Image (cartoon, rainbow, N blue to C red):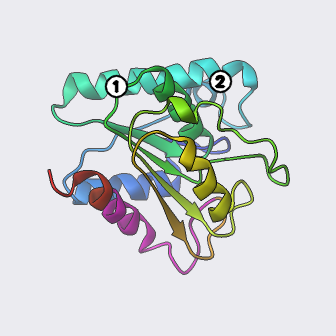
Amino acid sequence: MLTHGASGNCRGPLLVALAESFAAAGVDALRYDLPFRQARASGPPSPAWAARDQLSAGRAVALMKGTHSGRVFAGGHSYGGRQTTMWAATKPGTVDGLLLTSYPLHPPGRPAQLRTGHFPELRAPALFVSGTNDAFASIEELEAAVKLIPARVEVVSVAGAGHGLVTKANKDALPAMIVECFQAFFLVGL
């Protein structure tokens, strides 16, 4: 399951391209809108919506488990990935892994305000994909922070990409590259 960031929705170009690349690789992907986005078409989420947004990850996992057999992975872009990790930290063993694109480690320009308090509770393996020019986390900051997670973790950097991950140079190859990294991290050796 994949969800969007604070300014997007499940029809965003990156999520659509990722879902298409997963489908081409034989992996089912469910894109979904978080409750704050279902409530209004635009604008950032309010902190008052965070608990509902986190619970929606649980509903998406339950839906996928009810309709598909096999392993279930959850994740999302930026805010959606953060809300998914916060939910997963409270439900160990519920998902087989996390795919997090552009995890918002801290607000831009405020590296001391880390959003990692729940990292020690994460038990699912996690694959982080982040741009080398992301204002929400440098690759070095992210690599240091993920050491708090007591599960297998990998950080994949996307050269020259900002928080949106997509650039003119990588827009065609990026989704397939992320799916390749996902398969190598989660599926090889099964």
Provide residue 32's location: percent of width, then percent of height.
45, 35
The count of marks equals: 2
**Snapshot quadrant of residue 42:** top right
The answer to whether residue 56 is above or below residue 127 is above
Q: 69 or 94, which lies in front? A: 94
Q: Nearer the viewer, mark 1 or mark 2?
A: 1
Residue, x 55% and y 48% (percent of image)?
Answer: 147
> Can you identify the residue that label 1 sits on?
94
User: For numbered disc 2, what is the local secondary structure?
Assistant: helix
Foreground pick, 21 / 61: 61
Counting other residues with Cα less than 10 Å from the Cα at mark 1, is it few (<14), some (14-19), or many (20 or more)? Answer: many
Q: Is residue 176 magenta?
A: yes
Q: Position of residue 174 (x, y in %)?
A: 45, 69
**Circle 2 is placed at which residue position?**
50
154 versus 3 height, above or below: below
Q: Residue 15: image x %, image y %?
A: 46, 51
Q: Which mark is residue 11?
A: none
Within-10-Å neighbours for mark 2: few <14, some 14–19, many 20+: some
Task: Find the distance from the CA under tag 1 to the CA under tag 2.
Answer: 20 Å
Quarter-of-image position of residue 86:
top right
Which residue in the rendered view is the most extreme toward the right? 109
**Which amino acid lies under the numbered mark 1 shown in the image of this protein?**
Thr
**Mark 1 or 2 closer to N-term?**
2
Give, as a three-letter code, the residue at label 2.
Ala
Instruction: Name the residue rendered at 55%, 33% in the picture.
Output: 120
Tell me if residue 45 can be seen: yes
Query: Regarding mark 1 in the picture, which secondary structure is present there?
Result: loop
Q: Which residues are magenta?
A: 164-182
Q: Left or right? Give the position of 53 relative to 105.
A: left
Residue sitting at x 34%, y 56%: 182
Q: Position of residue 160 (x, y in %)?
A: 63, 76
At 62% from the left and 40% from the top, the residue drawn is: 79
